[in-house]
DNA sequence: ATTACTACCTGACAGC
DNA sequence: TGCTGTCAGGTAGTAA
């Protein structure tokens, strides 16, 4: 589910409750969520105070007195403030001012205790244009798989890559190293624009994404190609096509997006 | 370095 | 109703 705009929306909705709060109890209802060692992780958290809530890429980071709790929501993870735990609740953190429930149907999400920030590339909202262009020109492959690589650039996922490539007029299979600097510069500015708009809209709620207070996002109403196979391209009217690129459903306009 | 494929999990939905 | 197959916002691991 969540890509950079959704994780950032969760961060913003959660930070006012979490910053300064003390962790009183941690219960993992699924050992998977704790990476297989729920007792050790719970012990590292209990008694600590949350000093800051930050984000890099799709990782939500709670800074405690002694390290970082790295929460990755993967596909279906949700963090819910003061919600009743449902059938898919995987962890419950009792704080001195409320309760944080981690809900995750598919159980891909993870809580990881770290001393250092997660090993991912520069955040898509933080990277500057020259660095962005250099990263992409340094690789041979198709542009879409490169944009999805979190070790190169962190935060983009399947929805936003398709939306950004559409707005930049670049075909998902275009070879990154063969794109001109002006086209990559355009890609950079469209990336910033799309991510900014999506955060402003509270993210994209395709099926079940909600922020920490249960609010859905609305950016799905502004998707131009994602999930729109067969519908007319908003720019030229040609039918949006769906293909598979690096094992991911890929949506694009075969007329507007050039290699 | 790049690409392909499998696996991890569960649920929704289409088609028979 | 109920079975089967496909798909899903993510990523790690292995092999060619």
Image: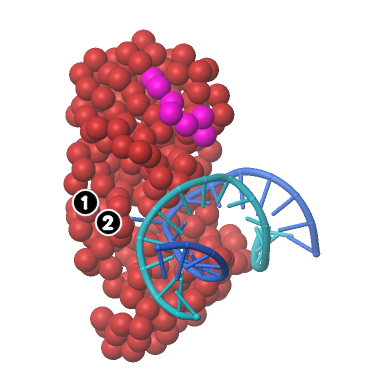
Chain colours: A red, B cyan, C blue
| Marks 2/1 same chain | yes
- For image coordinates 27% across by 36% down, the residue present is A80
- Whether residue A57 appears in this view of the structure is no
- Tell me whether the residue at label 2 lies in contact with that at label 1, contact meaning CB atoms closer than 8 angstroms: yes
Q: Chain of mark 2?
A: A
Instruction: Name the residue tied to disc 2.
Output: A205
- Whether residue A190 appears in this view of the structure is yes
Question: Regarding mark 1 in the picture, which secondary structure is present there?
Answer: loop
Q: Please tell me which of labels 2 and 1 falls first in the chain.
A: 2
Query: Alpha-carbon distance for marks 2 and 1?
Result: 6 Å
Residues A197 and A107: in front is A107
- In the rendered structure, the answer to whether residue A83 lies left or right of residue A190 reads left
- For image coordinates 29% across by 15% down, the residue present is A22
**Start-end of magenta stretch:** A26-32
Instruction: Name the residue tied to disc 1.
Output: A216
- For image coordinates 49% across by 76% down, the residue present is A243
Quadrant of residue A86 in the image?
Answer: top left
- For image coordinates 44% across by 77% down, the residue present is A242
Query: Considering only vertical position in the picture, is A159 above or below A80?
Result: below
Q: Residues within 10 Å of mark 2 (few under 14, many from 20)?
A: some
């Amino acid at each position: 589910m969540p890509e950079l705009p959704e994780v950032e929306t969760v961060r913003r909705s959660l930070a006012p409750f979490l910053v300064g709060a003390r962790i009183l109890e941690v219960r993992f209802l699924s050992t998977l969520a704790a990476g297989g060692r729920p007792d050790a992780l719970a012990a590292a958290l209990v008694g600590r105070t949350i000093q800051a809530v930050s984000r890099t890429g799709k990782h939500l980071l709670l800074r405690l007195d002694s390290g970082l709790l790295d929460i990755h929501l993967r596909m279906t993870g949700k963090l819910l403030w003061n919600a009743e735990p449902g059938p898919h609740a995987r962890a419950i953190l009792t704080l001195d001012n409320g309760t944080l429930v981690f809900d995750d149907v598919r159980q891909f999400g993870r809580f990881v205790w770290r001393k250092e920030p997660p090993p991912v590339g520069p955040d898509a909202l933080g990277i500057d244009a020259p660095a962005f262009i250099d990263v992409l020109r340094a690789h041979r492959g198709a542009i879409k798989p490169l944009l999805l690589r979190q070790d190169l650039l962190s935060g983009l996922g399947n929805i936003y890559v398709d939306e950004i490539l559409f707005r930049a007029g670049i075909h998902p299979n275009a070879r990154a190293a063969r794109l001109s600097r002006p086209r990559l510069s355009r890609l950079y500015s469209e990336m910033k624009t799309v991510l900014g708009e999506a955060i402003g809209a509270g993210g994209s709620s395709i099926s079940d994404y909600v922020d920490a207070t249960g609010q859905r996002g609305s950016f799905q109403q502004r998707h131009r190609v994602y999930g729109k196979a067969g519908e007319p391209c908003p720019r030229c009217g040609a039918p949006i096509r769906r293909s598979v690129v690096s094992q991911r459903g890929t949506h694009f306009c075969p007329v507007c997006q050039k290699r």
